[in-house]
Image (cartoon, rainbow, N blue to C red):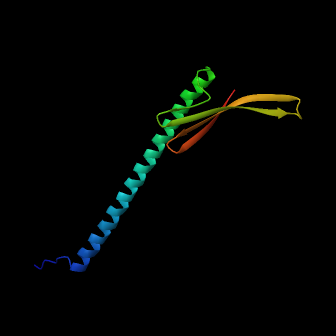
Amino acid sequence: MKRRAFTLMEVLVAVAVLALAATGTLRLVAMSQRSLAEVRIQRELIDRSRALQVRALAGDLPSSGREEDLFWERRTMSQELLEGLWTIRYGLLEVEYQGRSLLLCLP
């Protein structure tokens, strides 16, 4: 009974295929980690912006300020409608957090 072993070429091809699969898996993991970090930052920006919005609506927020790495600026805007017949006034709250910004409209 003859035993047939793998040739060197077959072993090299198998190792190359495994290396490609491992490299692809590691890249996917790294991309997932970066995406998850970005989602966390965006969620933190939205949560903290909502808290600032509540404070602004309650009248407890200065027109500009900073808390740790969160910056904000509140402006009052007005817009004429129907050729000046009506004028609406509203506020804009611009929030910056870790290089990202969000603009909220306040009634």
Is 74 located above or below residue 25 in the figure? above
Residue at the image position 48 percent from the left and 43 percent from the top? 39
Is 16 located above or below residue 84 in the figure? below
Residue at the image position 57 percent from the left and 42 percent from the top? 101
Instruction: List x then y, in percent, for residue 61.
Output: 59, 24
Is 96 located above or below residue 87 in the figure? below
In the image, 67 versus 17, the foreground residue is: 67
Residue at the image position 57 percent from the left and 23 percent from the top? 55
In the image, 71 versus 35, the foreground residue is: 71
Horizontal side of 86 relative to 47 (left or right) equals right
Q: Residue furthest left?
A: 1
Horizontal side of 76 relative to 3 (left or right) equals right
In the image, 105 versus 97, the foreground residue is: 97
Which quarter of the image is occupied by the C terminus?
top right
Which quarter of the image is occupied by the N terminus?
bottom left
Horizontal side of 30 relative to 54 (left or right) equals left
Residue at the image position 48 percent from the left and 36 percent from the top? 44
Instruction: List x then y, in percent, for residue 102.
Output: 59, 39
The count of marks equals 0
Q: Quadrant of residue 79?
A: top right
Instruction: List x then y, in percent, for residue 53.
Output: 59, 28
Instruction: List x then y, in percent, for residue 32.
Output: 41, 51
